Structures are given as C-alpha cells and as structure tokens.
Image (spheres, rainbow, N blue to C red):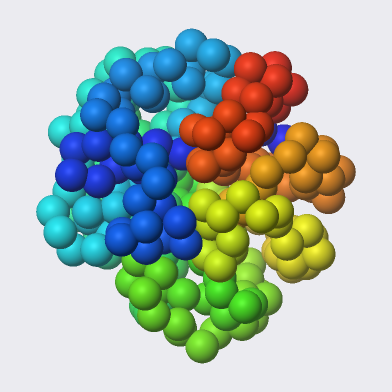
C-alpha cells in the first residue's frame, strides 16, 4: 500500500476543508506547486490533486495542475469536476497518470463504460460516501445508491481503481471507519484507495493488512498529526 498526500486546489491555493464544506476551510497555503514539490521531496512518489473549484462549477485550476506535473517526477492523479470526455482527455494530456471521476460516473454508467474502454487503467471512480450511500456533485447531494451496489456495477470495467472517501469523517481527524473500508476493499476486484479521517499509523497499517492499494491523506499530514517523514518512510513509494 502507498500513502498519498492530497493537494486540494481552491482559488489558486492549497487548502484543506472539513467535511468537504467550503465554509470550513482549516488549511490555506499560497503555493500549491511548492507544496506538491515538498511532498515529493519528502518521499511521496504519488500526489493526489483535487480541483475543488471545478468540482463546484466555479472555474478550474488546470494551470496549477500542469505546473505540478512539470515540477515533480511524481505520479499524479487528479479529480474534481470531470464530467465529460473533453475534460478527461485534457487532464490526461497534462501528463496526469489517473483521472478520478465521480458525479458523471455515477449518473451515466454508459458514458463511463465508453470512456473507460477508450482509456483503460486511466480512470479511477470516486465512490464518495456518507452513511454508506454514494454522494455526488462535490459531496453536496446523495445519489441514494449503496456503495457496495455501485461497486458490483463497476466490476467488469477496465478501471484504474476505486477511491472511497468517507465524507462525514473527511478533515475531522477523529479516526476512520475501518470496518466500512474493509467492506469496500472486499466488495470489488479493483484496487481500492481509502480516504477520510485517517489519523494514525495504526490505521494505515490496518488498511495495508486489509489489502488497500492506497490511502489518501490530508488534514492529518498538514497539521502533522501524522508525521510526514514517518509516513513517507513507511508508505511513500
């Protein structure tokens, strides 16, 4: 398993939100490219970028994404507001390894089947959840779909993986839902990345033992609740 720092972009800054709510911004750094470079230099070989503005329909931060890709040798995966084939291909053309798709993937399975066939092993589906149900549109709406039902529907597609974020725990540093994570990992043949509430090395060890492909870390790294050097040494590559 690898651990991946989240570089969440909002209005040209690197931020961390509590529960994905824009009004609860707890971290704001003015140089996201520099922050991404710092994470890579510390030993994190993969970076997770979320374009919050694009997710909420408030513009995009693709210039910054391009600079991050050019400024490090890290593997970069990007999500946020990818709702058509043009968006997906523009992001891949920046040199991004994997594109994370949420709302369109949930709402339009036929579209997802088509684009994943054209770009095998390049698309990760964001199965973001609140109380076991998949949420959409920047975490603002529930789809009403149980996450395990969604995973079953995705099983035949040539995806890069599944990213499951527990929205209710995101940014709160109150611990993760390990039983829920284990159920998601067991519920699909695809590689699973877990995010939301991860706060301790013990939780990372438990995810590793459960078979997670990756863990996306945000607030716990930025506040040094988790030691970045320790995490990078154990799970960075």
| Residue under the point 25% across and 36% down | 13
| Residue under the point 35% across and 51% down | 25
Q: Could you tell me residue 101's position as x and y percent?
A: 39, 59
| Residue under the point 52% across and 42% down | 219
Q: Would residue 103 be found to the left or right of residue 181 on screen? A: left
Q: Is residue 4 positioned above or below 170 on the image?
A: above
Q: Would residue 2 be found to the left or right of residue 222 on screen? A: right
| Residue under the point 53% across and 34% down | 223
* Corner quadrant of residue 221: top right
* Corner quadrant of residue 58: bottom left
Q: Would residue 214 be found to the left or right of residue 223 on screen? A: right
For the C terminus, which image quadrant?
Answer: top right
- Outermost residue toward the bottom in this view: 144
Q: Would residue 176 be found to the left or right of residue 89 on screen? A: right
Q: Is residue 168 positioned above or below 121 on the image?
A: below
Q: Could you tell me residue 168's position as x and y percent?
A: 56, 67
Q: Could you tell me residue 161's position as x and y percent?
A: 57, 52
């Amino acid at each position: 398993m690898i651990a991946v720092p989240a570089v969440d972009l909002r209005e040209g800054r690197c931020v961390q939100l509590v529960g994905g709510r824009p009004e609860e911004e707890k971290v704001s750094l003015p140089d996201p490219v520099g922050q991404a470079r710092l994470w890579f230099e510390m030993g994190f070989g993969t970076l997770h970028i979320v374009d919050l503005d694009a997710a909420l329909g408030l513009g995009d931060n693709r210039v910054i994404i391009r600079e991050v890709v050019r400024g490090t040798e890290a593997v970069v995966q990007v999500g946020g507001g990818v709702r058509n084939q043009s968006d997906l291909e523009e992001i891949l053309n920046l040199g991004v390894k994997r594109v994370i798709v949420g709302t369109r993937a949930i709402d339009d399975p036929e579209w997802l089947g088509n684009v994943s066939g054209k770009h095998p092993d390049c698309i990760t589906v964001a199965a973001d959840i609140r109380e076991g149900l998949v949420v959409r549109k920047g975490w603002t709406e529930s789809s009403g779909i149980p996450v395990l039902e969604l995973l079953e529907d995705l099983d035949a597609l040539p995806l890069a993986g599944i990213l499951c974020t527990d929205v209710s725990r995101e940014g709160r540093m109150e611990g993760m839902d390990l039983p829920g994570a284990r159920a998601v990992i067991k519920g699909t043949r695809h590689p699973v990345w877990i995010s939301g509430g991860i706060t301790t090395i013990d939780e990372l060890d438990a995810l590793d033992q459960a078979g997670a492909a990756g863990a996306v870390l945000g607030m716990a790294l930025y506040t040094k609740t988790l030691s970045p050097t320790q995490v990078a040494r154990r799970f960075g590559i």
